Amino acid sequence: MGNLRELPVTTLTGEPTTFAGLTGDRVALVVNVASKCGLTPQYEGLEALQKELGGDDFTVVGFPCNQFGAQEPGSPEEIATFCSTTYGVTFPLAAKIEVNGEGRDAVYDVLTATEDAEGKAGDIQWNFEKFVVGRDGKVIGRFRPLVEPDDPALRACIESALGKD
């Protein structure tokens, strides 16, 4: 596995970059997102985190994925419009990717090797699985889809990565 920060990423607008190109030197909360999922309202909490903590130290990064119930069927333009008009999303979004299986994106090869609080690594379970990534590109924490963006354990992990614990 390569260094997460150096791995190639394509932005939602089609621009090639790297993971570090999306995150800069910031702590990142990486989430596989979908527009038509029962968990889609988590965008609101993700954007609240971005508004509160975003800036030079922190960013949320969304990776749209259509692998779970075909719940992200839209084009890049449709995804961008939905996110901005429905939830006022200001955090960066990558191009739609696969997070599991043979076509899994290299970023998710690294992320899925990380264990959650129960010691389980492996495939993404569903939309809105969350990973806290430190400034150095190391994965600090993994949180399953039902963990809300304002969950105290997730929040503590982010604050620890930011040096606010």
Image (cartoon, rainbow, N blue to C red):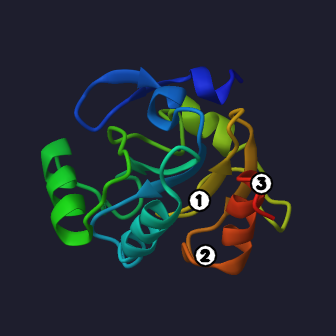
Q: Residue at x 20, y 43 (%)?
A: 76
- Tag 3 residue: 163
Do the CB atoms of the residues marked 1 and 2 lie less than 8 Å apart?
Answer: yes
Q: Residues within 10 Å of mark 3 (few under 14, many from 20)?
A: few
Q: Is residue 133 left or right of residue 86?
A: right
Do the CB atoms of the residues marked 3 and 2 lie less than 8 Å apart?
Answer: no
At label 2, which amino acid type do we have? Val
Report, in whole angstroms, how far the alpha carbon at label 1 lies from the one at label 2: 8 Å
Residue 21 in the image: state x and y as whole percent. 46, 27
- Which quarter shows the N terminus? top right
Mark 1 or mark 3, which is nearer the start of the sequence? 1
Q: Residues within 10 Å of mark 2 (few under 14, many from 20)?
A: some
Mark 2 or mark 3, which is nearer the start of the sequence? 2
Residue 121 in view (yes/no): no
- Tag 2 residue: 147
Task: Pick whichever, 90 or 113, lies toward us.
Answer: 90
Residue 145 in the image: state x and y as whole percent. 56, 69
Task: Pick whichever, 73 or 133, lies toward us.
Answer: 133
At label 1, which amino acid type do we have? Lys
Q: Residue at x 65, y 43 (%)?
A: 111
Mark 2 or mark 1, which is nearer the start of the sequence? 1
Among all residues in the image, which is located at the extreme right?
Answer: 119
Do the CB atoms of the residues marked 3 and 1 lie less than 8 Å apart?
Answer: no
Which of discs 3 and 1 lies nearer the camera? The answer is 3
- Tag 1 residue: 130
Report, in whole angstroms, how far the alpha carbon at label 3 lies from the one at label 1: 19 Å
- Which quarter shows the C terminus? bottom right
Q: Is residue 94 left or right of residue 1?
A: left
